[in-house]
Image (cartoon, grey):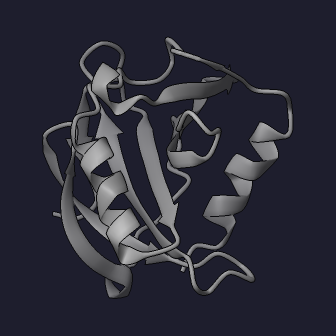
Amino acid sequence: MNKTAFLLPLLLVAGGAHAQQASGCPQLDASTGLTWEYRGGDGADFCRALRADGSEAFGMYISKKPTFSPQRSNRVENGSIGGRDVQWYRAELAGQPEIEARETLLKLDDGRSAHVWTQAPSKDQLQEVFELTRDIDFSTRHTAKVIAGQ
């Protein structure tokens, strides 16, 4: 289980990211009501999809070197992101065993990888988040290819 994968985004947020429809993030469907919190630099983009109340629906870290190494034993669900089939992997959040956390990895056409994660307090809410990720549009900035979960 990749506990450190969830620490990296938290460290990046501490640097003063701001909400916007960021050019380094894929396009969100307007009907989701989500906005991006974005931070970029050194060839990487950190994107958090935020609800109107400021809570995180899901996030992603896009970089040249993948920040997540899927382990087959952690496979739990099939799904799709941006119209592409993915395999979601179980993740653990330190000190929060009751949280349903998942992550996956996509290879982008520009050679970078998108590590996508989500966390929810229940399986029903996790399914709601999966619905939101299905319509992400990578075509405006990054076109994705699945590299995990085939």
Residue depicted at x 68% and y 67% = 4
The quadrant holding residue 70 is bottom left
Using the image as rendered, state which of residue 38 and residue 61 is in the foreground: 38
Q: Residue 10, how many percent across, how many down?
A: 75, 50
User: Is 25 located above or below residue 104 in the figure?
Assistant: above
Which residue of the protein is positioned furthest toward the front in this rendering? 53
Residue depicted at x 38% and y 24% = 26
Residue depicted at x 52% and y 72% = 121
Q: Quick check: 65 left or right of 110?
A: right
Residue depicted at x 30% and y 12% = 140
The quadrant holding residue 48 is top right
Q: Residue 130, how many percent across, how many down?
A: 30, 55
Query: How many numbered dots are placed on residues in this image?
Result: 0
> The C terminus appears in which quarter of the rendering?
bottom left
User: Is 58 located above or below residue 25 in the figure?
Assistant: below
Q: Quick check: 8 left or right of 36?
A: right
Q: Residue 21, how many percent across, how many down?
A: 51, 15
> The N terminus appears in which quarter of the rendering?
bottom right
Q: Residue 127, how many percent across, how many down?
A: 29, 63
Which residue of the protein is positioned furthest toward the right in this rendering? 15
